[in-house]
Amino acid sequence: MALEDVCSFKERPVQHKWFSFSSLGDAAIPFPKSDYYNLRLETSENNCGVPLHFFIPPLPHSSSFINRPLSSFCPPKNSMTVQRPFRLAHGTTTLGFIFQGGVIAAADTRASAGGLVACPAVHKITPIHSHLVVTSSGSGADCMLWERILIREIRLYQLRHGHRLSIRATAKLLSSMLHPFKGTEMCVALTLCGWDNGPKLIYVCSDGARLQGDVFSVGSGSPYAYGVLDRELRWSLSKGEAISLAREAVFRATHRDAYSGNNVDLFHITAQGWIVTVMRSVKTNLCAHEKKPRNL
């Protein structure tokens, strides 16, 4: 395929015992994986047979790094472990709901680490393609990694099969990839908000849980957001009312939850794609501007 030719991937079919793309239901064609560049990390029973491969481009003089023994990646035995002065708890407020005009996704923009505001302008809503966005909560590094993996797999699927993976199959794929990490310290909670033969809203957690519904709010501020949504949410909302409700729910959560705050990001997804409405501040009622979706 075009992307594989550009990246100089040598493709060969690999059937991993832990996951098969034929279970997604969208295609009966075996899904070949580019499994050529890796760090030669073998699978074991401890990781449920998941291949610990890291895909890297060919680099000059990289053979010495790739062929290093695994012991060289481990910390020395006499290394000291420095304890943090306080526990770096994470928090956020994200939400998504379905109404007669499509799907609304909203989130605050504060990245917190315990009592610290690590960043006041983080985008917690990530476009996957022209008709799908995901809201993320949990560990920032874990969420960004798995969002990039999801974008890559969906794009490669489209290049190979000539059509895009459905949102339900995307959620099933993500759940299958996350399930082997159940019980670890990885913390990922993604809500898929999109349009695929109608509005879709699916919640996927790092333990492999996959739930489909009409309204979800995730994060430390979610109880306060649910309080607003349960009172005002209804199917017959207009676009303006739905945007105001989502803004109000995140706004109220930021007043009660110390880990949420700063700005509000809003996405509206319809059959034509997603439109982002950027809120300059949670204390204002004005929408800054709208952006039209970029087709892949």
Image (spheres, grey):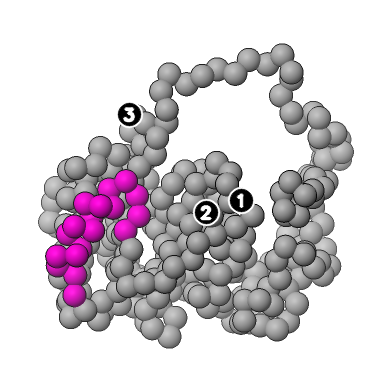
Q: Sequence order check: which comes first, mark 3 or mark 1?
A: 3
Q: Are marks 3 and 1 in contact (CB under 8 Å)?
A: no
Q: Is residue 100 above or below residue 296?
A: below
Q: Tell me where residue 152 sits by quadrant.
A: bottom right
Question: How far across and how far down the image is residue 196, in percent?
Answer: 44, 81
Residue at 54% from the left image edge and 55% from the top image edge: 207
| Label 2, residues with CA under 10 Å away: few <14, some 14-19, many ≥20 | many
Q: What span is colored magenta in the figure?
A: 217-234
Give the distance between the C-alpha atoms of the residues marked 3 and 1, in whole angstroms.
28 Å
Q: Tell me where residue 199 sits by quadrant.
A: bottom left
Q: Is residue 103 shown to the viewer in this render? A: no
> Magenta stretch mostly in which secondary structure?
helix
| Label 3, residues with CA under 10 Å away: few <14, some 14-19, many ≥20 | few
Q: Amino acid at mark 2?
A: Ser
Inspect the magenta stretch and tell me whether residue 232 lies in it: yes
Q: Which mark is residue 206?
A: 2
Question: How far across and how far down the image is residue 34, in percent?
Answer: 76, 62
Inspect the magenta stretch and tell me whether residue 215 lies in it: no
Give the distance between the C-alpha atoms of the residues marked 1 and 2, in whole angstroms.
7 Å
Q: Which mark is residue 115?
A: 3
Q: Is residue 198 above or below residue 280?
A: below
Q: Is residue 151 above or below residue 27?
A: above
Identify the residue position indicated by label 1 in the image.
181
Secondary structure, mark 1, is: helix
